[in-house]
Amino acid sequence: MGRRKKRWFSKFSINNKTFFNILGFFLIIIGIIILASFSQLFSSASSSQVLKQVNVQVLQLFGGLSIFVPFIILLVSGHFFNTKKLKFVRFNVTIGSFILLISLLGLFRSGIAGKAIYDNLSLDFTPLGSLAILLISFIIGFILFLDTSIDVR
């Protein structure tokens, strides 16, 4: 039998923690870029076309609630850095904020995503049913976000 060719990428291996750290930093950069794109709303300088395009796309997709998107991205990026020594982001806070954002998008029909959420729910469950589902999901997201229960005395 002949010898097998070694591939160049077989020498290149990355530790799982390193890969997740790189992914976490990538999400932090995306969150900061989206957050920085909102500074374009308050300045008249036309030098940063990329930030303007990012802002236009985020505002079209999420509407007025798009200000919360970079913070949720930053929360998600914190999960990629969790170790036993450094545990600063809890999973229920991230899931709760994500559910809160989805329910608020649907309730206010904010942006393309909010209109799609509300329209799909109202086609399946009537407008009153979609309103009830979105309100209940808002309450569930709020409970998860605060890590509490309804019957606290």
Image (cartoon, rainbow, N blue to C red):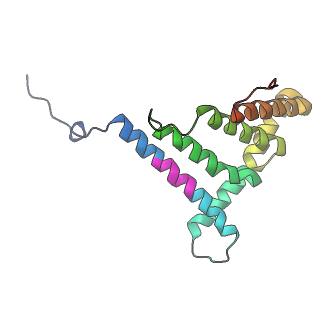
Based on the displayed image, in which of its 4 quarters is residue 45 positioned?
A: bottom right
Residue 86 in the figure: left or right of residue 139:
left
Bounds of the magenta segment: 25-32
Percent x, y for residue 91? Answer: 59, 32
Query: Given the current orientation, which residue lies at the most extreme right position?
Result: 128
Percent x, y for residue 31? Answer: 57, 52
Whether 96 is drawn above or below 44: the answer is above
Query: Given the current orientation, which residue lies at the most extreme front position?
Result: 153
Please give the name of the residue rendered at 76% of the width and 41% of the height, measured from the top-left corner: 116
Residue 32 in the figure: left or right of residue 149:
left
Q: Residue 94 lies in magenta, yes or no?
A: no
Question: Observer-nearest residue: 10 or 134?
Answer: 134
Please give the name of the residue rendered at 63% of the width and 32% of the height, measured from the top-left corner: 92
Whether 127 is drawn above or below 66: the answer is above
- Per the picture, the main secondary structure of the magenta-coloured stretch is helix
Based on the displayed image, in which of its 4 quarters is residue 76 positioned?
A: top right
Percent x, y for residue 44? Answer: 67, 77
Based on the displayed image, in which of its 4 quarters is residue 60 positioned?
A: bottom right
Percent x, y for residue 51? Answer: 59, 65
